[in-house]
Image (cartoon, grey):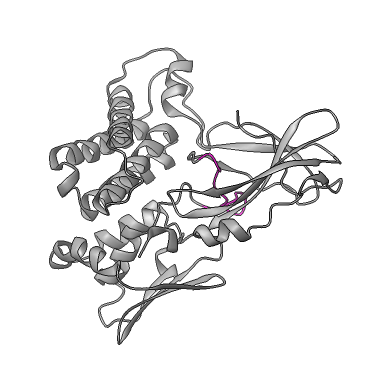
Amino acid sequence: MSTQGLPPVAPDVTAGIIEALTPRLRKRLDAAIDKLAAYPVSRDGDTVRITVGEDAELTLSIPTGSVTRAEDLHCSCLLAPACVHRAAAAASAPVADAEPTPETSNTPDPQGTSSTTETPDPNTATTPHQAAASTEPGAGTEPTGAERAAADALWTAGAAIVDAGVDTAGAVLQAGLLRAAHTARLAGLHRASAAAVAVATGLRTARAGDPAYRLTDLVAALRELLDVAHLLRTSTGGTAPALDALRGTSRRAYAPAGSLRLYGLFTEPVLTARGFAGAVTTTVDPTGTLRTIGDVAPGGGGRAGGARAPPGPGGAPPHAPGARPPRG
């Protein structure tokens, strides 16, 4: 089973499911993850199913494109909900970049970044601008108590990964890291949270023998995590811009740009290491501004070939949905 066949799972959901396991089942979790790889994954609309035995089936409900609640991941075995099947599925799936809300989209950035975007009006083209973090920075030049606590949790989880090494940093240690990432995101530490998710993703690809694994990328993400966490937890004062840089930002926002006529230039297929696929079309408006329209969602290579990312070369309707300038 490839992670490309599974929908993303929110980090706090994965952490909660694994933390609910008994010590005996935690010891069996890594073996269960390897065993789960042999089972087929099927998808029917907003439901993903994995048959894990004659009498057990995993069901993942993804009305928003990812698993955002523990109850969205159901198993029919007798030990559920505290069963190793649910934990193995959550630990095998890609990590959702952000917690979906009614105001945000689950479509990932085609460049593979950890930011998300606010859902634009379907009848208008939009122009993005950098948004402030969802948690307002403190008024002073020192981290708040909640930020220091979150940074401490990230440091502890990251240090545990270093102590264990790649070969033994299994699903339980990864769950601790994801829990710390979730806490950091709630505290407004988006840069450190993104680094923690990148480390967890790198560990999964390494342990799965995924060709996409790169040791240099994992080391860079781990260094970023520990550096930022250390600076946050030990800061005794500095400039507000420096502290804001350590906090990072959560997402980009959109503002209506009015009615536009767009002309299609080219379409690119998208296939990410986190289980998303589709296509992105680059367009230009009459003023020469480049904009993109994407159709990217959870799926594998087959979805990249069949994605709908209008318009093709030529003209587009004046109200192109979801248009935005591409990242440079």
Q: In the displayed structure, does residue 30 sit left or right of residue 115?
A: left
Q: Is residue 326 above or below residue 142?
A: below
- Confirm whether the magenta stretch covers residue 309: no
Residue at position x 54%, y 62% in the image:
302
Q: How many marks?
A: 0
Q: In the displayed structure, does residue 96 sit left or right of residue 14?
A: right
Image position, residue 263 (x, y; %): 81, 41
Give residue 50's quadrant in the image.
bottom left
Give, as a single range, the part of the protein colored magenta: 100-111
Q: Can residue 116 be seen in the rendering of this structure?
A: yes
Image position, residue 59 (x, y; %): 42, 74
* The N terminus, quarter of image: bottom left
Q: Is residue 85 above or below residue 129?
A: below
Q: In the displayed structure, does residue 281 sit left or right of residue 251?
A: right
Q: Can residue 82 be seen in the rendering of this structure?
A: no
Give residue 191's quadrant in the image.
top left
Q: Is residue 213 above or below residue 71?
A: above
- Confirm whether the magenta stretch covers residue 108: yes
Image position, residue 97 (x, y; %): 46, 47
* The C terminus, quarter of image: top right
Q: Give 77 or 6, whichever is nearer the viewer.
A: 6
Give the main secondary structure, helix, strand or loop, of the magenta stretch.
loop
Residue at position x 42%, y 17% in the image:
141
Q: Is residue 161 above or below residue 307?
A: above
Residue at position x 69%, y 52% in the image:
309
Image position, residue 221 (x, y; %): 33, 33
Q: Give 163 or 255, whichever is nearer the viewer.
A: 163
Residue at position x 31%, y 39% in the image:
214
